[in-house]
Image (cartoon, coloured by chain):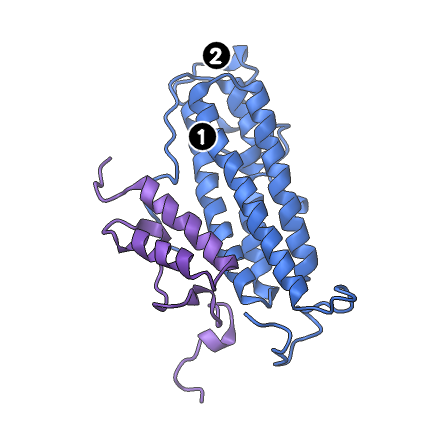
Chain colours: A purple, B blue
Amino acid sequence: MADSCVNLARSFAAWEVRLYLDTHPEDASALALYRRLCAQECGGYACVPHERDRWSWIDDPWPWEREANQTGKEA
Amino acid sequence: MWSYEKHLQYPVRIARTNPRLAQAIISQYGGPDGELGASLRYLSQRFSMPYARAKAALTDIGTEELAHLEIVGSIIHQLTRDLTPQEAVAGGFEAYLVDHTTGVYPQAASGMPFSAAALQVKGDPITDLSEDMAAEMKARTTYDNILRISDDPDVNDVIRFLRQREIVHYQRFGELLRHVQDQLDEQNFFAINPAFDLRAGDKGARDR
């Protein structure tokens, strides 16, 4: 593979835990597993920013919501 | 928005040309229960979905379906990459070849072009999540049917991966449906549409 940093198996494992966390955001052991998988250099596409102790990926607002699109002019 | 990773989610390496099989598998590219419809369904349902964990799952699963669309397209491409006109005729591929040569076009195995009529965005969380669970099972059955007619181990290995993903997504949508019902009146889940009747800042029934 051209990019030696791509690890399909590890990326997929992290992705699978991410989907699980979406429906189990309070599961601390799953969050710990996700963080371990993504701590590797090549966590890849599955790894997104989140708070340390909580699966905050799911939190509002989402990009299509007005609250996520403040321009700075609005109060 | 999205960014692109320059690799497949699961590798596709097919040795043998097989236009007949390509014509069957293309249903999961642009057919009624295919990956394109799945992705459009989930990514479109997000806008009216009031529950945070369902917004996240529809985003993530809808994104994974785009990765699966790419995998199915890769299978079609590799099954027809070295196709000769003689093989096209012998494999019943003439009609497709005339219309698309060896391009990958979103259509069903029957030849019907992709249609959004095969999916729904109803704007009601229970309705949409029920549709999503059904959609995953329809795709799983389609992959089962492909495995019934394919004897190519290179193809079947990838199809089995995709089939398993349908089952995992079905599980996640089932969990979401239960979560949504937990937020509603347990005497009558259907008394209101929480995507329509609880708007205007009433977040009481919407936890995350």
Q: Position of residue B103 (x, y in %)?
A: 46, 30
- At numbered mark 2, what does the secondary structure look like: helix, strand or loop? helix
Residue at 78% x, 68% y: name it: B191
Q: Residue lying farthest bottom?
A: A75
The residue to which callout 1 is attached is B158
Q: Foreground: B67 or B86?
A: B67
Q: Where is the N terminus of chain A found, in terms of image quarters?
A: top left
Residue at 66% x, 55% y: name it: B128
Q: Position of residue B56 (x, y in %)?
A: 50, 60
Say few, some or many: other residues with alpha carbon within 10 Å of mark 1 (under 14 / 14 to 19 / 20 or more): some
B50 displayed left or right of B162: right
* Among the 4 quarters of the image, the one containing residue B111: top right
Q: Position of residue B160 (x, y in %)?
A: 49, 30
Q: Foreground: A30 or B149?
A: A30
Residue at 52% x, 58% y: name it: A23
The circle drawn on residue B87 is 2
Q: Write down the chain letter for disc 1.
A: B
Please tell me whether residue B118 is drawn above or below residue B111 in the rendered image. below
B31 displayed left or right of B196: left
Q: Write down the chain letter for disc 2.
A: B
B106 displayed left or right of B115: left
- At numbered mark 1, what does the secondary structure look like: helix, strand or loop? helix
Which numbered disc, 2 or 1, marks the residue closer to the eye? 1
**Which is nearer the N-term, disc 2 or disc 1?**
2
Please tell me whether residue B78 is drawn above or below residue A50 in the rendered image. above
Can residue A68 be seen at all in this image of the molecule?
A: yes
